[in-house]
Amino acid sequence: MLGFNQSLLNRGNVVGLSVLLLVLGCPVLQGQGISPSPSYAGLRLVHAAGTTNRVQFLMNGRNISSNGLLPGYAGGVGGFPAGKTMFTAKSGEEPPSLPIPVELSSGRNVAVVAFLEPIPLKDRQPGKPEKKLAIIAIPQEATPEGKSRFRLLMLGEPSCEILCNDQKINLEAGKIQEVGGSARSIILRDGAKLITEYQPAKPGDHVIIVYRDASGAWAATQYEDRITKF
């Protein structure tokens, strides 16, 4: 079962992010829930970068992640004004990401995911990192009541085995792919090594992000996207 996501969270991350959101005038509820007005959107931050460094997320140039989030973090949902925004990610060592536009839709959540991508050979400098931060946004999508759906995102060239209902599936790097509504379990293996297994206890929209950690080993983090009642 995927219990590692919660174990990676620490009180400093959650408390620091919550305080910051309150300072910015963004209502925050304990845990993963939010209760903004209809003109607000939910926001989730995900650290799926293969680095031991904390990652900071900047929205319109303002840091919204306190002193940074730990690897594997996939939480911190809070209410932000709906509308067009620009996001950037930075850490202590890797070059920062290029800014990307992210649409925050009223009454919906969006996940902003930080990961590492190779720097082109022509742009690399001796003694400098060979990878830089990048970000991708995963908007929330409606799931029919009582139905299950898995959405998977592979960050890096696929080489691990992914099974859905014991059947092997193929993922394309950097593309969010959906696995049908009858999915009951997802298992990730790297050779004989089990990376993780996820069997949700109840139907919903389950998002799994697969990436390489700082040691180069495959890792995964996940979250369940719920339609929030505003």
Image (cartoon, rainbow, N blue to C red):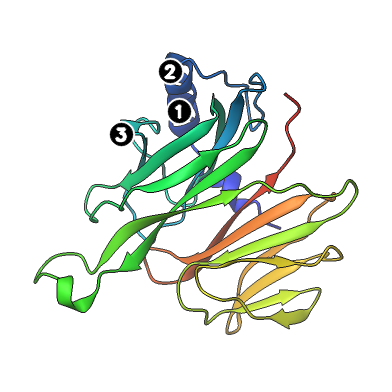
Q: Position of residue 150 (x, y in %)?
A: 73, 60
> Which marked residue is nearer to the observer: mark 2 or mark 1?
2
- The type of residue carrying mark 1 is Leu
Is residue 20 among the parts visible in the rendering? yes
> Dot 2: what SS?
loop
Tell me which residue sits at (63%, 31%) in the image: 106
**Mark pair 2, 3: CA separation:** 14 Å
Q: Quadrant of the C terminus?
A: top right
**Mark pair 3, 1: CA separation:** 16 Å
Q: Is residue 230 above or below residue 212?
A: above
Q: Residue furthest front?
A: 84
Q: How many marks?
A: 3
Tell me which residue sits at (74%, 51%) in the image: 205
**Mark pair 2, 1: CA separation:** 11 Å
Q: Is residue 88 above or below residue 127?
A: above
**Residue 163 shown left or right of residue 144 in the figure:** left
- The type of residue carrying mark 2 is Leu
Residue 17's label in the rendered image is 1
Tell me which residue sits at (84%, 62%) in the image: 181
Where does label 3 land, which residue?
61
Q: Position of residue 42 (x, y in %)?
A: 60, 33
> Which marked residue is nearer to the observer: mark 3 or mark 1?
3
Q: Position of residue 50 (x, y in %)?
A: 38, 61
- The type of residue carrying mark 3 is Gly
**Residue 230 shown left or right of residue 120 in the figure:** right
Q: Is residue 35 above or below residue 135?
A: above
- Label 3 crowd bin: few (<14), some (14–19), many (20+), radius 10 Å: few
Q: Nearer the viewer, residue 28 or 192?
A: 28
> Dot 1: what SS?
helix
Among the 4 quarters of the image, the one containing residue 32: top right
- Upstream in sequence: badge 2 or badge 3: 2
Q: Assess whether mark 3 and mark 2 are in contact (beta carbons under 8 angstroms).
A: no
